[in-house]
Amino acid sequence: MNYNNKKFKPIKNSENGETAEDTIFIYKQDGKILTSEYSGGQIKKGHLIGLVDEVGNIEMRYHQINTKGKFMTGICFSRRASPMSD
């Protein structure tokens, strides 16, 4: 799976998460290394860096500033959705 130049928005987040459907992530990928800039909703500006495994799952670290001017950092795991079967 190559995420380079793809745009994403969250569909589910943790209870204390600040990203929402109006947060847009723009991914760049070089080999297994993934980076992204994002903003929207409660996020004024954010960046992430992560590693993509062989099936497209991502382990990431992020830092962001929200619209209240608060700085946040953390770890995120993104799983590639399984294709729907007929």
Image (tube, helix red, strand yellow):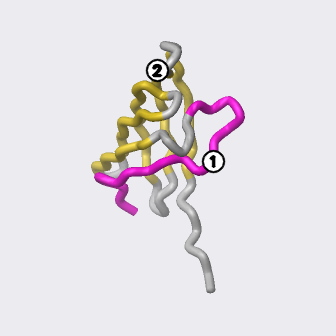
In the rendered image, the vertical position of residue 76 relative to residue 32, given as above or below: above
x and y, in percent, of residue 85 in the image = 62, 81
Q: Which mark is residue 65?
A: 2
SS for callout 2:
strand
Dot 2 or dot 1, earlier in sequence: 1
Q: Residue 17: within the magenta?
A: yes
* Residue at point 67%, 38% (across, down): 14
Over which residues does the magenta segment extend? 1-18
x and y, in percent, of residue 51 in the image = 43, 45
* Residue at point 56%, 40% (across, down): 20
In the rendered image, the vertical position of residue 71 relative to residue 8, given as above or below: above
Nearer-the-camera pick, 1 or 14 = 14
13 sits left or right of 57 in the view: right
- Other-residue count near label 1 (Cα within 10 Å), few / some / many at <14 / 14–19 / ≥20: few
- Other-residue count near label 2 (Cα within 10 Å), few / some / many at <14 / 14–19 / ≥20: some
* Residue at point 44%, 50% (across, down): 8
Q: Distance between the Cα atoms at labels 2 and 1? A: 20 Å
Q: Type of residue at label 2? A: Ile
Nearer-the-camera pick, 63 or 20 = 20
The quarter of the picture where the C terminus appears is bottom right
Q: Residue 14: within the magenta?
A: yes
x and y, in percent, of residue 26 in the image = 35, 45
Give the quarter of the image for residue 21: top right
Provide the residue designation for mark 1. 12
* Residue at point 39%, 31% (across, down): 47
